[in-house]
């Protein structure tokens, strides 16, 4: 069994991590900690195998907390700030997860920390269950989105529009980073600024794709991928 703590000041982050851990039957949550001092007190009393650690917290920042531990357990950082990754690896963390992250990426971090032999065979990286939901960070909150409802992605400067059947969600992420959260077999990039959900394609005519009421352009560099799709 892998005993773990979640150390994060955002309640929704606890829900996401705990939900993913529940898909792995050998993961046991020992405590939800909403600041580093709470985690420090617990670690002085109880053994832990793994900490999911946020960085930007009140009272004591994540890495400052980590430096206070003489014999820290394995640590997987979960944060929205990519600029601290190098410092994290210098502190021997196992992995650095950028929020928002999907189950596929989460599972890779667990495998990296403990090895796939620690997980049931059905949860190895080659047998990842279909991903049905992801969490997208928009306007300082996480929005849960059904993957099957996503129609297409559109890059817009430093942001990406995620268009689904109900609404359009704008996230401050590159389109490539959002695509990394989604199952590869279900989405196809068809233009430098557009990626589409294959299941939502109504028709393809000339250099554009019809999805819902919208038409998505096909870029010259991506024409080959579209042609391959038509042959499959």
Image (tube, rainbow, N blue to C red):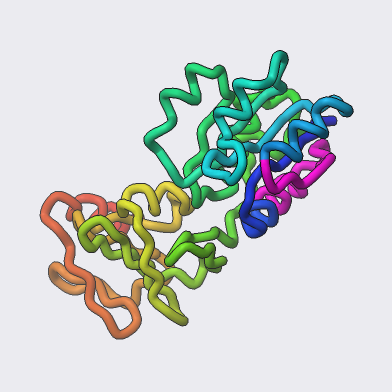
Which residue, as the protein is rendered here, is positioned at the far bottom? 213
Image position of 33 with respect to 74: above or below? below
- Give the extent of the magenta segment: 17-35
Location of the C terminus (image quadrant): bottom left
Query: Does 46 appear in magenta?
Result: no
Location of the N terminus (image quadrant): top right
- Give the x, y percent position of residue 214: 27, 80
Residue 226 in sight from this viewpoint: no
- Give the x, y percent position of residue 110: 65, 32
Q: Residue at x 54, y 50 (%)?
A: 102
- Give the x, y percent position of residue 210: 27, 77
Which residue, as the protein is rendered here, is positioned at the far right? 45
* 58 left or right, relative to 81: right
Q: Residue at x 69, y 20 (%)?
A: 69
Image position of 144 with respect to 96: above or below? below
Image position of 50 with respect to 135: above or below? above
Which residue, as the protein is rendered here, is positioned at the far top? 70
Q: Splitting the image into 4 quarters, where does residue 114 fall?
A: top right
Q: Residue at x 19, y 74 (%)?
A: 205
- Give the x, y percent position of residue 150: 44, 69
Front one among 27 and 217: 27
Image position of 195 with respect to 168: above or below? above
Residue 101 in sight from this viewpoint: yes
Front one among 47 and 228: 47
Q: Splitting the image into 4 quarters, where does residue 94 fall?
A: top right
* 73 left or right, relative to 183: right
* 51 left or right, relative to 151: right
Q: Residue at x 25, y 56 (%)?
A: 158
């Amino acid at each position: 069994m892998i005993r773990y703590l979640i150390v994060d000041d955002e309640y929704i982050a606890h829900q996401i991590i705990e939900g993913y851990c529940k898909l792995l039957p050998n993961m046991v949550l020992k405590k939800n900690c909403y600041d580093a001092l709470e985690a420090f007190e617990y670690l002085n009393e109880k053994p832990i195998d793994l900490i999911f650690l946020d960085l930007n917290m009140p009272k004591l920042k994540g890495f400052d907390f980590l430096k206070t531990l003489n014999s820290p357990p394995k640590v997987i950082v979960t944060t929205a700030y990519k600029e601290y990754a190098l410092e994290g690896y210098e502190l021997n963390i196992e992995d650095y997860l950028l929020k928002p992250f999907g189950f596929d990426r989460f599972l890779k971090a667990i495998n990296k920390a403990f090895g796939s032999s620690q997980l049931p065979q059905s949860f190895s990286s080659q047998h990842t269950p279909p991903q049905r939901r992801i969490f997208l960070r928009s306007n300082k909150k996480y929005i849960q989105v059904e993957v099957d409802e996503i129609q297409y992605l559109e890059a817009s400067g430093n942001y990406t529009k995620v268009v689904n059947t109900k609404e359009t969600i704008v996230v401050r992420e590159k389109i490539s980073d959002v695509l990394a959260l989604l199952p590869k077999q279900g989405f196809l990039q068809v233009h430098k600024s557009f990626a589409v959900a294959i299941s939502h394609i109504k028709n393809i005519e000339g250099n554009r794709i019809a999805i819902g009421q919208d038409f998505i352009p096909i870029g010259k560099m991506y024409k080959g991928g579209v042609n391959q799709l038509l042959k499959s």
